[in-house]
Amino acid sequence: MVFDPITISLLLAAAIRLGAPMLLASLGELVSERTGVLNIGLEGIMLFGAFGAVFGLQLTGMPYAAVAFGALWGMLAVGVVAIAVASLRADQIVVGIGFNILALGATSLLRDMVLSPAFQSPSLRNVSSYRIPYFSELPIVGRAVFSQSPILYGAVIVAILFWIFFRHTRLGLIFRAVGEGASAADAAGISVTNIRFSAMLVTGIMTGIAGAYLTLVASGGVFVDNITGGRGYLAVAVVIFGRWHPIWVMLASILFGAADALQYQGQAIGLSISPPLLLMSPFLLALIAWVLVGKSKTGPSEIGIPFLRGQK
Amino acid sequence: MLNRPYVELTGVSKSFVAGHPVLEEVSLTFRRGEIHAILGENGAGKSTLLNILFGMHQPDTGGILLEGRQVIHTSPADAIANRIGMVHQHFKLVPSFTVAENLRLAASPSARKRLVRNADIEKIAKDYGLPVDPKAIVGNLPLSLQQRVEILKALINRAELILFDEPTTILNPSEIEAFYRVLRQIADDGRAVVVVTHHLGEVLAHAEHASVIRRGKLISSAPVADRNRGDFVREMVGKSVDLDMPLKSDYVANGATVIALKGVSVAPTQSSSGLNNASLTLHAGEVVGVAGVEGNGQRELFELLAGLRQPESGTVEAQSRHPNGRAIAGLVPEDRHHEGLVLDLPVSVNLLLNRIGQEPYSRHGRLVHGEIARKAEEMRVACDVRARSVSVTPRTLSGGNQQKIVLARALNEDAPTVIVYQPTRGLDVAASEEVLKRLRQAANGGKAVLIISSNLDEILRVSDRIVVLYAGQTVGKVTSDTPREIIGDLMTGGGKQGSVNA
């Protein structure tokens, strides 16, 4: 294996670039899970966001309007899940899986119907990368960390804001209470349904942006069927790996991004492992996350449990 | 001021299933400075009444008057805003949060300002006479302290009417005394207190006013001073039950020994003293009561007799054993929801859970549903489990009926021994009576029955012999004629006889 500064820089850059969609989605998922909702539908929501972004790009020709479209589509998509899960109290796993299957078919159909194959994407350099003055000149980390998409910088700021939100604000306390003891929150006069619904809307926005990032930053404005390729599921694993903490979730998504990057960069660094095996590595990591963290349960205790007042 | 009604319920009715009213035309008056007890059997509608006051449920008809003006509570938030607080039977606390976080969560906007620093909380709690450590994780606190946090939640929101749903079920006798001192203080400060309970003794000793509800109807509401124990029991149960009549046999100790514990020891844990050289013999045809304050080795004793654990020293000699060496006994565990029943499997399966893999209930690995249903129905009728059929799940049944299922299974076990642990916890007067009668019948039928309970009353009523467990030792061999004071003394470590062979 070759490890010179340039390779390391490239590998790190790829890890962060590919970790970004998982960071965005897992930060969103974190908010839901903290209120006790396990949103498996992340994969489908991300797909809708990815489609929505390209659709928006085609309509407006403006990259940032496209990102907003992705967020909006993500929010609408999560609305469907939230009505079923938070308002109608359906089983969260069943709804999520069903929704993902629906999303795969629906986005494929919509692509066929509304996206023009001849569409020439405008320059996406604005959303793809921004060199932060001075810092981007630093060796190794300059290219790897400080020459990324502005969306990623936004995600890092959001992670820090979430951390402050959960730790230091009253609303954050209420969100956590709904996830740790829904009936206690209910008795304190808090609407569990409203809190879970709002949390899921945040999840939808973040995940929609994650989808937008995939199409706009990672694939040059093109939507292909199943473009998410399991990254929504991986984001759920990232939350667990990051132990429901925004900062750890950030680091965990870089780790997952690195595993994702190996399939592209593996050969560059002289790793003599078959590419299909490398392709598997993020999922292997996810499996390890489930097993390791599953053993020492530290997640919100109400996770996955619909709230019904007065249940035995 | 003290005699004017503070909160009134006027003709409140409520049904969850059409045609099956839980409450019918109940009118009650709560006054400041008064401890008002609401008595009734399980399922009488007491908790529903409190939930309506607290906005968890809305009445179908009737309403709530607050100082004479009509109020509507559509959610707990409305009730809290109207200065009503509630201490639920199953605490509404977030177990993973600290005391401070739980209080801040529940505090109204105006109360929140006073809770900014942990030191503020510590001081307020102390001022109310309910000191707590604001930094403690609630889930790690003993139940009596968790209850204290619940009371503080109500006080911090300046509640003027505080509702308590079965507050003493989880407390031991000395904690109960302390609890009522707190209630007295709360009432003396000019607040109204409502306590739902089915412990008559507490009502007679501490409440000014008592109302009895039976099957959703208000039977009586009057000052306690004018009433006696018998009146209340008659009104609660609807018929006369003589609670002081012992359920005794004319048993003479000549039955065969079915189980003998000889000098067994189990290491202590944080919540229990373990067992320390304890000895116990059980004969066919007798009921033996194990009295003692919780945490003095009861759980370990139950687990040893149930074959769930091995002693670290000493021996367990049992007359009948499984091929795998485990002692066979009919078991009624302490926690019927988790250890006694599979709440979401049908009653039939629960009744036969100990035999379901054997003939004739299963053949060649296949369940014989017809036979299971037939036998289960037979057991259901024999034990008077009030369920529509054996195919419903125990989750939908009352606590009394759930316990009858566990007991029916234990008595149906092909073993000479029945070990019951807290057999009447959470059950009302009539259901408790049923359980104790069945245990007596089982002994008369030749079984050896061991009752491990922290309820001295029931032990005194039904036992032929009594053993007191203190600090993991069997410290006394007393009979039901032994004065309560002496048994109480033994239970709290007063008896210095040391270990005896009971």
Image (spheres, rainbow, N blue to C red):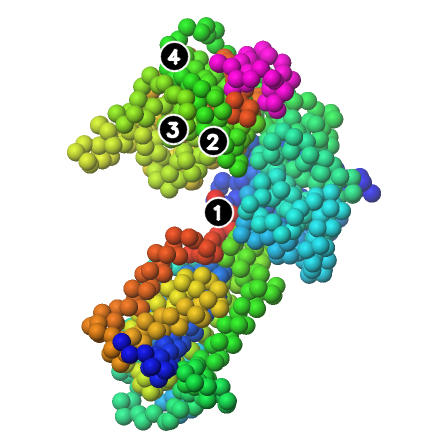
Which residue is identified by label 4? B257
Asked if the stretch drawn in magenta spans residue B96, the answer is: no
* Magenta residues (range): B474-502
Of the two numbered discs 3 and 2 in the rendering, the one whose residue sits closer to the viewer: 2
Q: Which residue is mark 1?
A: A311
C-alpha span from label 1 to label 3: 37 Å
Between residue B37 and residue A209, name the one nearer to us: A209
Label 1 sits on a secondary structure element that is loop
Q: CA distance from mark 3 to mark 4?
A: 20 Å
User: Do the residues under discs 1 and 2 have CB atoms within 8 angstroms?
Assistant: no
**Residue at the extreme right of the image, as rendered:** B1
Pointer 2 or 4: first along the chain = 4
- Quadrant in the picture for residue A173: bottom right
Circles 3 and 2: CB atoms closer than 8 Å: no
Tell me whether marks 3 and 2 sit on the same chain.
yes
Question: Which residue is pictured at 58% across the width and 19% down the height?
Answer: B243
Chain letter behind tag 2: B
